[in-house]
Every structure is written in C-alpha cells, then in structure tokens.
C-alpha cells in the first residue's frame, strides 16, 4: 500500500493547520512539534537456538503538560523513529480531545513477532522494559498495548517493573490481564469507542446503523472487536482483512465465524462463507456505508481517496489518512471521524484502569462502559460543535480542541526558569 507522505509529515502538517487557525505563537508551535524526550535503545535478546539478536527500540515522550505520558508499545518489522514520534504526538492530542489527564507517548520495537516464540518475545519485552525503567512509571509514563502487543506483553512489563521496585506496581502499565488488575472492558474499549462515534455520526447523517454495510481493514484486537460490536448492533459486516488480504460478501459475514477461522488457520483468507477474496487496497474501495481502517498508517492517500465509496470513515487505526486524501474526502462529503476522536476509547479505558489501580478499586463492566459512553459522546459532540463553529471538517475541529487545550496548558504552566 503506497503512502504518499510519512506519518510524521502528516502529524506535523496537521499541527501546522491547527496552529494557524489557533494563531499560536511560534515558540509554542515549535515546542508542540517536537518530543520532550526520545529514548533509543538496543535490546540484546537470547533466541531459542542460543544466538543473540540485537533489536532496535525506542520510547518517544511528546508533551506531558496535562499529566503523565501515556501511549502504546508497537512491535512491528517496519517501526521507525519517525512513525513512533508521530504516534506519540497523536496521543497527546487524543488525550486532550477526550479531556483525560495525560500527555502523549509511544514506544516501538523493530521486530517480527510472527517469527518469534513466546519465550523470545518475553525475553525481548523484559529487556526492553529494563532499558526504559528510569523513564516509565505510574506518574511518569504508562505504556499500553498497540500493534502485535497484548495483555500478556503488559503482564511481562508489569512484572519486570515490579521486580526492580521490589513491590507490585500494577499501575505502571494498562491493558493488563484482568487477574493482574486489568480493567473490565479494556480490550474492547477502543472498538466500542469507534462504534459509539460511528453511531453518533450515523445519527447526524441519517444513516441507519441496523443493516448498514461495514468494511473493516485489519482484523486484530481493534478490527475484530469493532466488527463484533457492529454485528451485535445489527450492522452487516461485508468485508474484513488482515496483513495477508481480505474476504468479502455483500450479504454479510459473521465476524465470530471469521474469528474462529482466523484462530484456526492464522488468517481470514480461505473463510468458506466469503463470496470472494479481496486485497487490502480493494477492500478500501468496496461499496459500503461505513469504512473502518483498523491496521496501519497511510492507507487512504491521494491515490485512492477518490475511489472511497463509504459515507462514514471511522478511523480506528492511527493515521490511516493523509492530508491530501482528507481534502479529497471533504470534497466528496465523506464524514471522517478522525483517529484522535474515533479510537480514543482505548486510552480512556486505560485511564479507568490506572484510576482503579491507584485507588485499589475494581469497577464493574457496566460502570466502565457507562463512563466510556459519557466521555466519548461528549467528545464527539464537542468536536462536532467546533466543526460547525469553525466551518471546518471533523479532523481539523478535533485538532483545534486537542492542540488548543495542550497549548493553553503549556502557557498556563509557564516556562521554567
Ligand atoms: P493488532 O496487532 O491486534 O492488529 C493489527 C491487525 O492489522 C492485524 O489483523 C494484522 O494482520 C493487520 N495488518 C497488519 N499489517 C497490515 C497491512 N499491511 N494491511 C492490512 N492489515 C494489516 O493491533 P491493534 O491493537 O488492533 O491496532 C490496530 C490499529 O489500531 C493500530 O493503528 C493501532 O495504533 C490502533 N489503536 C489501537 C488501540 C488499542 O487499544 N489496541 C488503541 C488506539 C488505536
């Protein structure tokens, strides 16, 4: 899939647009355009055959004016510093859009988890955590899962961090297994948030969610759970995909059955009830009402934006759309729910997990989902209102809210010394 611009260029261009409208002074703009701290590490890892592989990893901490840094850790063969920096910046705006007291960070390790054993992944994770020890912590920087990391990865991070502290510190990381203090609802929260914002947009546009045709790119934690929730709400999942390609059926696919098939075979490809297979590129251009990219950045570019047929684009992935593509989608009057709003359910539930850990409380699933619904519906309508007031699109409106709140926090803190 050809991107026409790197994620960091996208993030910087988005910041530029917001800075101009907000009339930020250049010092604040430059401050916001750079991470506060970047840690780059070499991670020697013993492989099962006794060889040592040295992996590259990093943690980028963007801005912590509104609270401790917060952001996921990605394991992927194409991870690089520019991508992780962009992802950290988006985390900062996202936390501000939903108004939770965090700054933005992101971590990455350049590796291919599909070719590594569980024991190798555990040793890599523990060594990486060891190298981040002085930079993370419950009041400093709280990691969470992202692509190819999960609750088990977070358990290893918690254990490593706790061993060094000498006592158990569940609040050092979120997205943990429930048995270790993870929050009920956290695994599904990103997807539930995506579907809540899609539901609100559908109401605005008069699109009926029941029987609406939905295509989902990426069938990992976020994509699969979004497909499941949409199916449970009566929508029709017409296509899903993973890194190897996708399956399509205009009559609808049962995501539970596709999930079972993927668990057995490792891919959605070959699912018997599909009408045909589609590439990841073709999936984006399918006839559908709602398109949910839930994989990587740079999927909707100037090359394919003109061919998108969906009425609503719910950005579950971070950075799936480039600024040139945004212009084309705006012209086509496609309603884009930007990533920093659409997928903010994940960090919001992470915040709930952190609060539960710090207060030693346990909330029920109903409590978690009620609070999530309240925060996300409010954020959606705050952004929608800004969109109308500023006569702009949802992305710029979300950036105006997010960047504006962070800039105000920086100015209010003042500059020391
Ligand atoms: P995951 O590892 O569980 O799933 C990723 C999925 O993308 C897999 O199905 C994989 O096969 C697919 N994929 C990988 N490369 C692909 C390619 N080139 N084309 C199409 N599909 C490809 O990761 P996840 O946690 O579900 O994250 C998905 C997206 O959601 C990412 O952009 C992530 O940053 C974003 N996100 C995740 C969370 C969260 O809570 N996990 C929160 C906010 C945003």
Image (cartoon, grey):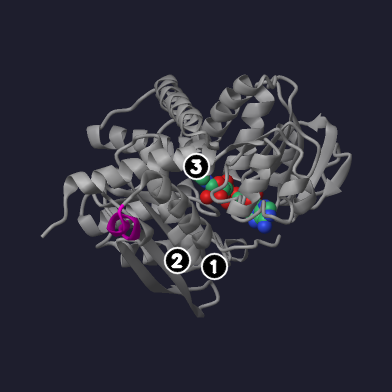
Residue 272 drawn at (x, y percent): 86, 40
Q: Tell which residue pokes out farthest to the left in this image.
A: 417
Beta carbon of the mark 1 residue lies under 8 A of ligand 1: no
Q: Secondary structure at mark 1?
A: loop
Question: 97 above or below 303?
Answer: above
Mark toward the viewer: 1 or 2: 1
- Residues at discs 3 and 2 in contact (Cβ within 8 Å): no
**Mark-to-mark CA distance, 3 and 2:** 39 Å
Classify residue 99 by image quadrant: top left
Residue 232, can we see it?
yes
Residue on which the image places disc 2: 124
Residue on which the image places disc 3: 396
Residue 60 drawn at (x, y percent): 37, 61
Question: Per the image, is 368 magenta?
Answer: no
Residue 189 drawn at (x, y percent): 49, 34
For marks 1 and 2 on the same chain, the one whose residue lies earlier in the sequence: 1
For marks 1 and 3 on the same chain, the one whose residue lies earlier in the sequence: 1
Residue 174, can we see it?
no
- Residues at discs 1 and 2 in contact (Cβ within 8 Å): yes
Residue on which the image places disc 1: 111
- Residue at position x 58%, y 67% in the image: 77
């Amino acid at each position: 899939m050809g991107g026409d611009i790197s994620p960091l260029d996208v993030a910087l261009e988005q910041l530029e647009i917001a800075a101009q409208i907000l009339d930020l002074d250049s010092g604040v703009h430059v401050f916001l355009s750079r991470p506060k701290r970047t840690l780059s590490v070499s991670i020697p890892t013993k492989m099962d055959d006794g060889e040592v592989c040295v992996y590259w990893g990093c943690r980028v901490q963007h801005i912590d004016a509104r609270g401790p840094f917060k952001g996921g850790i990605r394991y992927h063969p194409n991870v690089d510093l520019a991508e992780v920096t962009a992802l950290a910046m988006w985390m900062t705006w996202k936390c501000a859009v939903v108004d939770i007291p965090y700054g933005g960070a992101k971590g990455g390790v350049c590796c291919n988890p599909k070719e590594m054993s569980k024991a190798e992944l555990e040793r890599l994770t523990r060594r990486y955590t060891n190298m981040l020890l002085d930079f993370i912590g419950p009041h400093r920087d709280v990691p969470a899962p992202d692509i190819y990391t999960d609750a088990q990865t977070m358990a290893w991070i918690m254990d490593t961090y706790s061993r060094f502290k000498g006592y158990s510190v569940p609040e050092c990381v979120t997205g943990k297994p429930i048995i270790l203090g993870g929050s009920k609802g956290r695994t599904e929260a990103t997807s539930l948030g995506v579907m809540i914002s899609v539901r609100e947009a559908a109401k605005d546009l008069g699109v009926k969610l029941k029987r609406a045709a939905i295509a989902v790119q990426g069938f990992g934690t976020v994509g699969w759970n979004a497909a499941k929730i949409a199916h449970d709400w009566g929508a029709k999942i017409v296509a899903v995909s993973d890194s190897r390609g996708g399956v399509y059926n205009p009559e609808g696919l049962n995501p539970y059955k596709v999930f079972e098939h993927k668990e057995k075979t490792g891919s959605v490809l070959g699912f018997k009830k599909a009408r045909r297979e589609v590439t990841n590129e073709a999936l984006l251009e399918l006839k559908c009402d709602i398109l949910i990219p839930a994989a990587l950045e740079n999927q909707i570019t100037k090359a394919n934006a003109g061919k998108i047929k969906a009425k609503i684009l719910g950005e579950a992935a971070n950075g799936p759309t480039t600024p040139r593509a945004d212009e084309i989608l705006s012209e086509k009057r496609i309603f884009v729910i930007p990533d920093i709003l659409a997928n903010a359910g994940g960090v919001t539930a992470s915040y709930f997990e952190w609060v539960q850990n710090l207060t030693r409380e346990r909330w029920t699933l109903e409590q978690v989902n009620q609070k999530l619904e309240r925060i996300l519906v409010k954020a959606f309508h705050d952004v929608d209102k800004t969109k109308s007031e500023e006569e702009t699109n949802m992305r710029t409106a979300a950036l105006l809210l997010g960047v504006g709140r962070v800039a105000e926090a920086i100015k209010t803190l003042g500059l020391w010394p």
